Structures are given as C-alpha cells and as structure tokens.
Image (tube, rainbow, N blue to C red):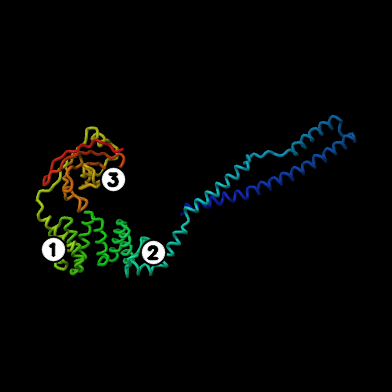
Amino acid sequence: MIEFYLFAAAMVAVALGFIFYPLYKRNLKAHEQAYTLSNTRLIKQRLIEIDAEYAQGIISKKHQEQAQKELKLALLDETQSPTSSIPKLSKPVSVSLFIALVIAVATVYWHSNQLTGMQRLIDAQAQMNVLTDKIIVNPSQDVSMDDIQDFTLAIRSLIANNAEDATGWMLLGRLYSALSQFEQSYQAFEKSLLIAPNNTETLASYAQALMMPNQLDYLRQAVPVLTKLLSLEPDNNQAALMLAMTSGQVGDVAMSERYFAQVKDLLPANNPAIVQIQARIDELNGQPKVATGFSVTINATAEMNARLAQVNRLQPSYLFVFAKDAQGTNPLPVAVKKLDLRVLPMTVTLTNADAMMASYSLNDISAVKLVARLSFDENVQTSIGELQGTTTITKEPNAVIPVTIMINEEIK
C-alpha cells in the first residue's frame, strides 16, 4: 500500500509539472521581453546623444561612426529572440507524454483500489445473520458456493477484530473444509484449539476435516484428535465410529476393534460404515506377518559422489524414496519415505506401511518404478539441480525384495 501512495504522489508531481512549467516559461519570456525593450530604448537614446556630441564638436567623425557601429550591433543582438538552453519538446511528444501519464495513473488505480472487494465485504457482513441461519443453524439444501465464500469473508472480518474468538476460528475451519481448502482449514482449527483446547465441537469438526482427503498422513493426525474427544466424551458414539474407521485405515487393529465394539450393535449389520470397518479388521487380522515391499540401497556414480563432496557447494539435505505404478495408470506414489540425507550408500525399507493413501498401496500394482531423489528442500516435487536415480522391478507379494538404485541423473 505504501508503494501505491509513493507512486501516486510521483504521478501527481508530474501532472503538476505539466501545469506549472508552461506558466513559469511564459512569465520568464515576458520578463525577457521587458528587459529587451528597456535595453533597446537606452541604445536608441545613446545614438541620439552621439549625433549631438558630433554636432557640438566633442567627438570626431571617426569616433562617431565607430560608436554608432557598436551600438547598432548591440541593438541587433537585443532584438533577436534568445535561444533557450533547454531543448523544447514538440507538441506530439508532449501530448504523448500526457496520455502515457493518464494511462499509468488509471492502471495503478484499477489494480490498487479495493472498492469491489470492500462492497462484497459490506454485503457479506450485512447478510451475516441470514447466512448463519442458512449454513449453521438450519442448514439449507440450496446453500451455494457463493454463500459459503461470503460467509467465510464475513467470519474472517470478525476474527480480524478479535483474534481470540475460538468459535470464529472453528467456523472458519469448517468453511475452508467445505471449500476443500484443507490446509487453511487445519490451521484455523488448530488456532481455535489453542484458545479452547477442550472444545468438543471443534475437535469433532477438526477430525472430520482430517478424514476428508483420505490420506494416511492426515488420518494419522485424526487419531489423537478423536482419542482426546473420546476422553472428554466417552459416550460419543459418532466419534467412536470415526475412530474405529480411522485407526483401521492406519493399521491399528487393536484400537479399531475396541471402538468398533462400542458402536457395531447400534447400527444395522448392512450399514456401509459397519461393513467397511469389519472388512478392514478382518484384513488386518488375516494379513501375513511378512510385509510386501523393497529394501532399497541408494548409491551414486563416481561423478555424482565427487560433485556431492565438493567444498563450498550447497548439498542436498533430504532423501526421498518412493514407488509408483510403472505402467503409469496412477501418477500418485503408492509408498514414500523422506529421510535426512546421510553419507551414501544408504539402505531404506519401503513397504505397504509407507502408503500415502489407505485405499492405494503396493498391493494394488505389480510393476513398480522406484525413485530415489536427493532434494534441497522438504518438497517431494522436483526442482532444478536435484539428483535422482530410478529403476523398475516386479513386486513379489509378502516379500521384501533387495534393490539397488544408482543416483546418476541431474534434474534440469
């Protein structure tokens, strides 16, 4: 915002220059004309005096002619227009500069003014009670995405004036979750729980949001949230059902069985949630003790090792090892590990336990592409300059296969 005011002030100064500079030039020219007129009169008066002096015999004919010649030259210089030392701009150039100034000011105003956003905020605040009833109190079937966005905007404006509003942060978390903006949703729930850590409504909403993407990392985070909720409300059967499902997805069969026993008789046996949890428990109890996966040894070519050992060179800090479907039917990794990079060679075990999603693991593919990447940051996405190696292998069920990956490629 400060940059805008500075730029606007500069534009105003330039605009004032277009107004006052011509006035200044006109006044200067008038002054020069008056000065020239005064000098011309003096020179003509002196010519008359010289003629009188010659007639009186005070000066000779030669001196008369010489003096008249010098005064006439001076008169010629005075009557000629002085040449300005400042180059003049042509009219087309001046008009072009003025148009460019107007366009620049209009562009800055267009991009910097928040009139539209402010009007939407004012409208959202005015509809706050209506939206609260429509979305929270008596949920309506005709709630639109615009309604949710307007309500989010209104809640954010309230929180801006009261950062300790735990209910406001909780509502904001729900709204972000409805918009599928999960990271913002989790941050809002965490801020609410910092203010009111035992609010069971916030804990339940947070757990539901963590379960929505169906990714193992988030499901693992949901388990302690639900556990705390049940410690505060042991008879909360909805939370028990959620924990039975979540703990089963992350592979904790004992916890899944414990909370499944609390709720399974409360719902029909053919209820989809009951069927899904029971099937997952049976799968966990019947799965072989030997994992399916790979024991991956990562090394680097002599050239790459020499580059990694160079002095004063930014070294990669992290090692990512992940498995993908070699046939390319699904671009997501089926398993991934991130470790702090140590001295190569390193050996990493990658199994079903390292799956990213509960519904997608090494059991779902046969041909596996293994990738080892030396990364400068904690982001699994590739960056220019990072080093990696790959290999393709066929999976063997219930076996951990030894594999070697050579780091031999620089990402460009």
Report the amino acid beneath label 1.
Answer: Arg
Q: Position of residue 164 (x, y in %)?
A: 34, 65
Residue 19's place in the image compared with 149, above or below, is above
Quarter-wise, where is residue 32 in the image? Answer: top right
Q: Secondary structure at mark 3?
A: loop
Checking the image for residue 258, the label placed there is 1
CA gap between label 2 and label 3 equals 35 Å
Query: With 203 as the anchor, is 251 left or right in this view?
Result: left
Depth check, front residue: 58 or 9: 9
Furthest residue in direction right, as rendered: 56
Q: Dot 2 lies on which element?
A: helix
Q: Secondary structure at mark 1?
A: helix
- Which residue is tagged 2? 154
Q: Amino acid at mark 2?
A: Ala
User: What residue sits 18% from the left and 69% below the top?
Assistant: 235
Image quadrant holding the C terminus, namely: top left
